[in-house]
Amino acid sequence: MDKATDLFDHVLVPSSVEEEISQKRDRARDILQEALAAGKVKITTASNPRFVAALRRRLGKGESETIVIGLELKADMVILDDHAARTEARRLGLQVKGTLGLIRKLRDSGTIKLDEGNLYARLQEIGFRVRKDIYLEIFR
């Protein structure tokens, strides 16, 4: 996450996503806390809870809030990995990137300097789960 702040002017994390990450006992939680303490990211909440609730009928809480915040702030991009959430976000006019797409962008820009194998191992260490064949497809 701290590397992502090098690419973007503003990195906002929905409060529901922060709650979800904070409940975990892994490196992702530590990375988020470090980024928050350094002022690199900010926590935000959707101002339209009814819209979030409507999306929650078919999407997760974090995905729903991410989409609503993206629309409210006219965000350049939202990061979503869930297929249904990505589809809905695009339907609503948002630009969507997945976590792996963001990581690929960071690697291609030289911000992340690990080769494919070491990067995959690092992602596994911090609790990010993805099938190796999907990972390799994105990083070719």
Image: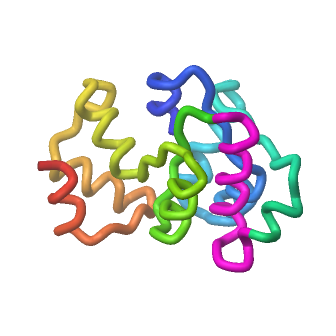
Q: Quadrant of residue 124?
A: bottom left
**Residue 27 visible in this rendered orientation of the protein:** no
Q: From the viewer's perspective, is residue 75 above or below residue 85?
A: above
Q: Residue at x 33, y 26 (%)?
A: 111
Q: Which residues are magenta?
A: 55-74
Q: Position of residue 139 (x, y in %)?
A: 18, 49
The residue closer to the viewer here, 140 or 126, is 140
Q: Position of residue 63 (x, y in %)?
A: 63, 62
Q: Is residue 54 left or right of residue 74?
A: right
Q: Residue at x 69, y 62 (%)?
A: 64
Q: From the viewer's perspective, is residue 63 above or below residue 118?
A: below
Q: Residue at x 42, y 62 (%)?
A: 128
Q: From the viewer's perspective, is residue 136 above or below residue 36?
A: below
Q: Is residue 109 left or right of residue 17?
A: left
Q: Is residue 58 magenta?
A: yes
Q: Is residue 51 magenta?
A: no
Q: From the viewer's perspective, is residue 116 above or below residue 91?
A: above
Q: Residue at x 38, y 68 (%)?
A: 129
